Image (tube, rainbow, N blue to C red):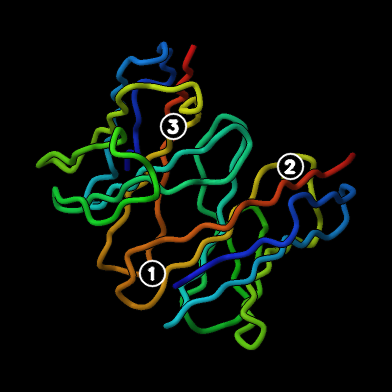
Amino acid sequence: AQSVAQPEDQVNVAEGNPLTVKCTYSVSGNPYLFWYVQYPNRGLQFLLKYITGDNLVKGSYGFEAEFNKSQTSFHLKKPSALVSDSALYFCAVRDGDYGQNFVFGPGTRLSVLP
Amino acid sequence: EAGVTQSPTHLIKTRGQQATLRCSPISGHTSVYWYQQALGLGLQFLLWYDEGEERNRGNFPPRFSGRQFPNYSSELNVNALELEDSALYLCASSSPWVGNQPQHFGDGTRLSIL
């Protein structure tokens, strides 16, 4: 069975500092990994995905994520945080080339302090 | 391209009533997923429909049901409403047989039970 863990419920960072939101996963086959962001009273917005290839994936709004197969991790990063980045972030995994089930992590609330 | 649309935006019901929530997927997407998100918390998977069939179901009682129509739109029905059903209900769509594609979410229906 596939699973996703986000070990931090809350991450606080000062504006202008780099941010990292952590995600680890477990799947049987090849992992397809996704990051989403959710602003208050909105649905989830897709940020980026890892399918294959380069371990560093670039996405929307200056976010990037680093895939590490040996550590089964897919951490979300941004070099310089903005107050507007404050939101709820979800990591998700889909298992294999024909996996239909998406599994979402519990979410991490990011607060960027001015 | 139009995104995933959900209606109504807000729905207020009383205990014991029935609620119907609707979702229109992105054009070309045949899969529709339903999630429940209690206030500020993670996503709980409810149902997955594809090509008119229920493909998977989360750990919810039978009073949560739904269907998918020939045009791939979907509705979620919740019978015998309870106070704990108050939540944001999110719909997502995707192409199920293309594993590297993300789910795309609507902005949800906020269901409040009085």
Which chain does the numbered disc 2 sit on?
A: A
Residue A57 location (% of width, % of height): 59, 72
**Amino acid type at image mark 3:** Gly
Q: Report the disc number at residue B61.
A: none
Q: Pointers 2 and 3 in contact (CB under 8 A)?
A: no
Q: Report the disc number at residue A86.
A: 2
Q: Secondary structure at mark 1?
A: loop
**Amino acid type at image mark 2:** Ser
Single out the residue that lies furthest toward the left: B70
Q: Secondary structure at mark 3?
A: loop
Residue B114 location (% of width, % of height): 49, 11
Residue B29 location (% of width, % of height): 25, 52
Which chain does the numbered disc 3 sit on?
A: B
Q: Is residue A8 above or below residue B106?
A: below
Q: Where does label 3 land, which residue?
A: B108
Q: Is residue B84 above or below residue A1?
A: above
Q: Nearer the viewer, mark 1 or mark 3?
A: 3
Instruction: Specify whether B2 is left or right of A6.
Output: left
Q: Is residue A52 above or below residue B76?
A: below
Residue B64 location (% of width, % of height): 31, 35
**Amino acid type at image mark 1:** Asn
Q: Report the disc number at residue B100.
A: 1
In the image shown, does A29 or B93 lie closer to the viewer? Answer: A29
The residue drawn where x is 28% and y is 55% is: B56
